[in-house]
Image: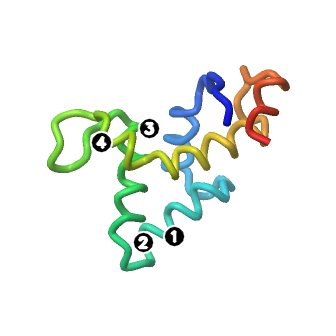
Amino acid sequence: QGLAALDGLSAHVRYLMDHPSQRSKAMELLQVQALSQNDDQKKLVYEAVQSIATQIPRAGHDVVGLGTYLDARAGWTQLAKEYALTRMGPTIVQGESQLFQ
């Protein structure tokens, strides 16, 4: 397990949400799972990811808080790995991206 600053990740996730034609296996998987399954947990993960990226609280919440981050963890982790490994983040140095391999 590693920790690295991923400057631009939130902006990148917002971009993926606004431009569905952009290829992102992680985002595509989150969206498909949230929309096609009768699994409320998968929908919750996607909504939490969306909330973190936009900094807009989920319905019924006043803030983007700890619960949102905990709910989004699995999805956000996959997006972060993809972002780092595909070198989409312009400020990621090679050594930091290797933490996710």
Q: CA distance from mark 3 to mark 4?
A: 15 Å
Q: Residues within 10 Å of mark 3 (few under 14, many from 20)?
A: some
* Mark 4 or mark 1, whichever is nearer to me: 4
Q: Which residue is mark 4?
A: 67
Residue 82 position, x and y percent, is 69, 46
Residue 81 position, x and y percent, is 68, 43
Q: CA distance from mark 3 to mark 2?
A: 19 Å
Residue 28 position, x and y percent, is 59, 62
Q: Which residue is mark 1?
A: 32
Q: Which residue is mark 3?
A: 53
CB under 8 Å between callouts 3 and 2?
Answer: no
Q: Earlier in the sequence, mark 3 or mark 2?
A: 2
Find numbered disc 2 in the image and state the secondary structure of the residue it sits on: helix
Using the image as rendered, state which of residue 83 and residue 41 is in the foreground. Answer: 41
Q: Earlier in the sequence, mark 4 or mark 1?
A: 1
Q: Which residue is mark 2?
A: 35
Image quarter where the C terminus lies is top right
Q: Earlier in the sequence, mark 3 or mark 4?
A: 3
* Mark 3 or mark 4, whichever is nearer to me: 4
Q: Which residue appears at 60% of the width and 23% of the height? A: 7
CB under 8 Å between callouts 2 and 1?
Answer: yes
Q: Is residue 63 left or right of residue 49?
A: left
Using the image as rendered, state which of residue 36 and residue 39 is in the foreground. Answer: 39
Image quarter where the N terminus lies is top right
When asked about the image quadrant of residue 34, the answer is: bottom left
Name which residue type carries label 2: Leu
Residue 52 position, x and y percent, is 40, 38
